[in-house]
Each structure stands twice: as C-alpha cells, then as structure tokens.
Amino acid sequence: MTHAEIPVDPSGSGQVAPVLSVDDLDIDFWVDGTWYPAVEQASFKLFPGEVLAIVGESGSGKSTIAMSIMGLLPKNSHVEGSIKLGQRELVGASQRAFRAIRGKEVSVIFQEPMTALNPVYTIGFQIMEMLRTHQAMAPSQARKRAIELLTMVEIPDPERRVDAYPHQLSGGQRQRAMIAQSLAMDPRLLIADEPTTALDVTVQAEVLKLMRDLKDRLDASIILITHDMGVVADMATRIIVMKEGRIVETGTAREIFRHPQQAYTRQLLEAVPHLGSVVATEGVEVASHLADALDGAAPTSSTHTTPVEVDKLRRATAPAGVPLVVDLVDVAVEYPRRGRTPAFRAVDDFTLAIGQGEVVGLVGESGSGKTTIGRAIVGLLPFVEGSASVVGTNMVNARESDLRTVRNDVSFVFQDPGSSLNPRLPVGESIGEPLLLRKVVKGKKALSARVEALLDQVQLPRALRNRYPHELSGGQRQRVGIARALALSPKLLIADEPTSALDVSVQAKVLDLFQELQRDQGFACLFVSHDLAVVEILARRIVVMHHGKLVEMGTREQILSNPLDDYTKRLLAAVPVPDPDEQAIRREQRDKLLAAGVGVEPDEFEVFA
C-alpha cells in the first residue's frame, strides 16, 4: 500500500478516508480450557494526521488492540470483526502479509526501548536492517539514511552514535533511537504504547515534542496508548476510554476532559494528580523566616548558593523544634572502586534535614543522585565527606553493628514490588520475614496475628496472605511492599518511585493509603520521585537534585510557585497537566524557556562499558 492509496474515500463522498477502521472487534484468549474475553465490540476510525489516545486501567484491552493491528497476538488468541488498514483487511491475514506491512506501513514505539532494541547490535545496524528488509538498498545508502533519521530525532552527533550500542545511550536517547527505527519507512500509522512511562519529565517532554513535530512533518496518524492523562492532554486529538475490554466513551480531547459523560471517565480524571492543585487550594505562603535566614538576599540562582547559605536554608526550612531523623551536612557519596574502574562520586556537597513525622520530597532526573542518597542513608553506600546522622547514628565510617541498628529503624518501599518481593514466598511470609529475622515476635500465632494486622493496615483482605506475588495486581503488590516496610514500625521510610508504574486510579488509592498510614504512625519519609504532581500531594518540603548536587530546597509552595533555579523552572515546565488548554499554554512557555537556553545543558554521550 502506498501513501497515495489511503486519502481518497472509495465511496466517492469526497471525504478523507480513514487510515484505520476497526469494526466490532472481539478478541478472546484460551486459558486453562476457557475462553476469556479481552476486547468486546470495539469500533473506531483513525484519520490522517490524527492522534487517537486509548486510555484505561491495566487489563482494559488497550495494548491488546494495538497488538492485533500488528498481528502480534499470541497463538492462544481468537480475533473476530474487522481491522482495515486503508482498504486492506488485517483480520485473518497471513504472517507474510503482516511482515510486509510491519515497519513499512505501521510501526510501534514500545514502552521499554532497552528490551525492544537488540543489545548485541548497534542502533545503526538495527535501523539499517529495517531499511534493507523492505527495499533494495546498498549498505552505504542504508547507513547514510540511518544517520539522517538519527539527525531527524535530534540525537546529538549522529555520525558517531550510529555505531553505539543501546546500553551506551541514555533512556531518552534510546527512546529516540527506537522512534528513528519506527519512522525509517515513513509509516502512515504509528502506534505508541506507553512511550514515555519510564522517562523523566524533561525527557518525556522532549520525546512528545519530537513525536508532535514528526507527525506534522509526515502527516502520520498516531495511536497513543497511555495511562498518563497529562500526556493525553498534550498530544491527543480524540480519546477512547476503555474499561474491562469495552469502549465506554469516546470524544475529542476537550470534550472528554471538560465534559465527561460516563462515571468511569469522571473517576479516572478525578484520580489524576494535577500539578499546582494543592498549592492553589491551600494558598501560597512564602516563609518570611527563609528570607531572614539568608539575610534578605535570596540568590537569583541557587546553583551558586554557598555552603553556608545552603546550611542556613536547610535550618530555615526544617520544622522548628522537631527532632531530626535525618541530618546530612555537606555530604559526598561514592560508588567504590572496582578493579580498574575508579571510584565514582555520585553525590557531592549535599545537605538535607528530615524532622520526625515529616515527609520530604526528593526530585530530579534519572542519574541526579536521588536513589544514591536513599542507599547511603541505610548504609548501602558510604558517606565519604561531611557529617551524616540517621536516627541518631553517625553514618560516617559506621560499623556493621551501627548499621544493623539503623536498618531496624529505616525501611524501603521500592518502585517495582514485583521484583523486590520473593516470587517463591507467599506474600504473608514476605511481610512476616522482617519480624522473624529481627526476632520481634515469638511463636507462629503471634506472627500470624501481626501479619494480619499489617494486611488490615494496608487495606488488603487477610485471605491474600497465602497468594504469591504474581497472583496479585500491581496495586496489591505495592500494598504488600508497604506492609512489609512497616512491619518493624520504622522511624524513617524511604519510598523510591513507589507509584510510577501504577495506573492513575490505583496510584490515587495507594497515595491515599500512604497519607493515612503516615498520619497514623507518624514515621518520617523521604519520598523519591520525578513526578512533581505526586510529590506535591505528599510532601511539605521539596529538595531538587541535578547531577549529584543540591540545586534548590524549600517549602512546597516556594518550589512550585516561585522557583529560584533555572533547572527547577525547566523541571516544572516539563510536567504535563491533564487539561488540553492549560497544557497548550505550558507547552508554549516551555518552548520559550528552551529557546532562551534556560536550564539547558549539552547532552552527554553516556558510556557504561
């Protein structure tokens, strides 16, 4: 099918013909002797130059529809209905027919480029393979075209990076490389399946801008599958809302966001964190004592704040009269030397105070040092400079016995509970394991009662204690992770991106639960995230990191309403909000910031050999 075959409506109506037509689509899966419906009676059309967003919770059928268009469903699937690409029927088509259209007429941008790209081939080879599969082309021509594509997706120094392997690129660069591969044959239809879920907000904004520019340049159509309603507001022309395999509502982006008709759609939108909503509700309170602490001379850019000013800032923003659970002053953290690999300083000149019962948000891009700080607080990495006190223990040159004491009082909630929970243990045993190791309870009856009490606290049925992690949903596994972390009644909880992989409705429930538990138990918390809208809900103070250094700290109101540092401004401008009109304004403001060079640094070639 050529591009010229698509635009004309064969009925002679003069209207533009759809690129894709889906009618009465049913998809079932055969599992353990039973057919389970995944998609029921789905119908929609996609026109040239349009971005159609398909939204809904996990298991609603979004990705199943996408994979059926590509002919990538597993063998235990059964498809009925019609999927037409232009005038070509895809339901029942042979694998040979699908191979002819994949990449050439329809391409996919997958959620995780590190698993979608082959790690043993350079990105240039993988792009050239796509080109030479679909058309006769000499290797030198294919290489030249690959460099052109990498240039088009704005990868710096494409002549050199065409020979880079996937692991030698940053997450954003890998995503751009996969987009370049997807666009190699100028497809008319691009399926983007959660293309920005694993990306930082600044990289996400750049990838979305790239997709928008390429869509306009190629007049391509896009199916955007995501649970991030901010991304939907930024990109979508029309929206389809799915629940349990059925389309429950469809309309333009403005109609869905402003006037949703179905209760489920309203529930989905109400669960979305909106950056600035908490600050707007509570009002902006600029702390006068902060200005006093800095002698009335707040720096125009906190990147240039002296260590003395940073310490004053820390003392000014820490809660008065509250014992400090974490007290870090001018610390540096290094990954130790291994063989010929020298020691790497991941955090330098960093200062942080967390009071008893306080929640502090730690934000920044991947590689900024957020997780490194969390690991150092529990003694998994050494503090090599400065002074560090955690729950009253000096962590500089701490002995093993000191670390054991600290780890009794500090717990972790990880980003992916599916990989942090032992897959061979029922979740009840995983929750009770810390109690057994620390000999907190004696006897099976006391242990069982404590595990049930923890399940009650995280609002999980006691019957789930005998289930294995893979038998639970993502939200349930995250609740198990929280219950395990609370087993020893910690004084400090470190939550490392605990909601980033969850659907918005599940995320909202987990956040509500987290707030309730924190109020009831009064533990201090370091909440590590790149999602500023989530941090705004939980934290009263926010600390911003960039390249291992503290660039700004302050109250929630100060950071979100009056940021001092250019990097913080760029970070805030990159966060998409779930409102098409407001997001259009924010996108324009962000483009002006980038055009002015605010917070922009040269992109570095990352080599992790």
Image: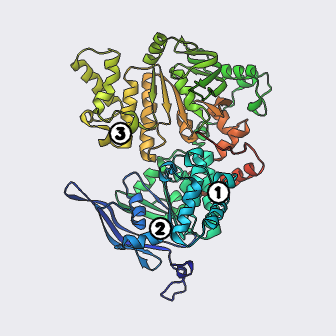
Q: Secondary structure at mark 3?
A: helix
From where the camera sits, is residue 311 visible?
yes
Could you tell me if the residues under marks 3 and 1 are in contact, i.e. CB atoms within 8 Å? no
Q: Amino acid at mark 3?
A: Gln
Residue 192 or residue 97, whichever sits in front = 97
Measured as percent of width and height from the top left, residue 318 is found at 62, 21
C-alpha distance separating marks 2 and 3: 37 Å
Q: Earlier in the sequence, mark 2 or mark 1?
A: 2
Q: Is any part of residue 248 visible from this angle? A: no
Specify which label sits upstream in the sequence, 3 or 1. Answer: 3
Front: mark 3 or 1: 3
Please give the residue where the numbered disc 3 appears in the rendered image.
Answer: 476
**Looking at the rendering, which quadrant does residue 168 occupy?**
top right
Q: Nearer the viewer, residue 208 or 300?
A: 208
Give the residue at mark 2.
Answer: 102
What residue did someone put label 1 on?
Answer: 584
Q: Viewed as shown, does residue 594 lie left or right of 378? A: right
In this view of the protein, which residue sits in the foreground, 160 or 11? 160
- Establish if 13 lies above or below 342: below
Q: Residue at x 50, y 21 (%)?
A: 378
Q: Which quadrant of the figure has residue 382?
A: top right
Residue extending farthest bottom: 12
Q: CA distance from mark 3 to mark 1?
A: 36 Å
Q: Nearer the viewer, residue 358 or 325?
A: 325
